[in-house]
Image: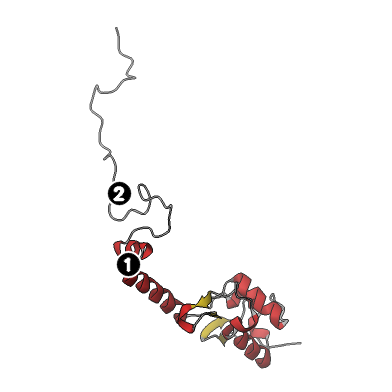
Amino acid sequence: MSQEVRQIVRIGDTDLDGFKPVAYALTRIRGIGIPTAYAICRYLGINPSIRLGQLDDETIRKLDWAVRNLHQFAPGWFVNRPKDPETGGRNIHLLGADLVLAAKRDIDLMKKLRSWKGIRHNLGLKVRGGQRTRTTGRLGLTVGVAKGKTAAGGGGGGGGSK
């Protein structure tokens, strides 16, 4: 059974490594993590541990369809854009550049509305509540006491006489 393994497989507008297992090869697509890849394999009945390059054309076509249409068979809580306001409240799952652009649009909308998160984004500060800013997230040079030679005779512990 000398089946040839494809080196590169194109799924979801992304070139994937054909030598990796199916589940881990799918994670190279932006917007698909390991749980999502395993869910897609389980839905299609594909063994997630076989190499992606060993799959036949029909299975790869089904895999491409499932990646692009994850919102059709996955529950609403599983997709990355549940109740998307731009599409009228539909559950959609974005991939690749669409995901990056949607996140940027969301941040721009927060800035435009001058919400708390938008103001924090504008100022370049921590956005999520409860994050400490006193010691972490500093930019620029390090702040602290400059180390130098200690003065002679200064400090204790020298063991002098009485």
Residue 89's disc number: none
- Residue 108 spot, x, y in % from top left: 35, 73
Of callouts 2 and 1, which one flags the residue occurring earlier in the amino acid sequence? 1
Residue 7 lies, with reference to residue 141, above or below; the image says below
Decide which of 114, 78 is in the foreground and name it: 114
Depth-wise, is mark 2 or mark 1 nearer the camera? 1
Q: What element carries label 2?
A: loop
Residue 155 lies, with reference to residue 112, above or below; the image says above
The residue depicted at 60 percent of the width and 75 percent of the height is 76
Does the image show residue 24?
yes
**Residue 10 is drawn in which quadrant?**
bottom right
The residue depicted at 41 percent of the width and 79 percent of the height is 101
Does the image show residue 8?
no
The residue depicted at 73 percent of the width and 87 percent of the height is 2
- Residue 27 spot, x, y in % from top left: 57, 74
- Name the residue beneath numbered marker 1: 114
- Residue 19 spot, x, y in % from top left: 62, 79
- Name the residue beneath numbered marker 2: 142
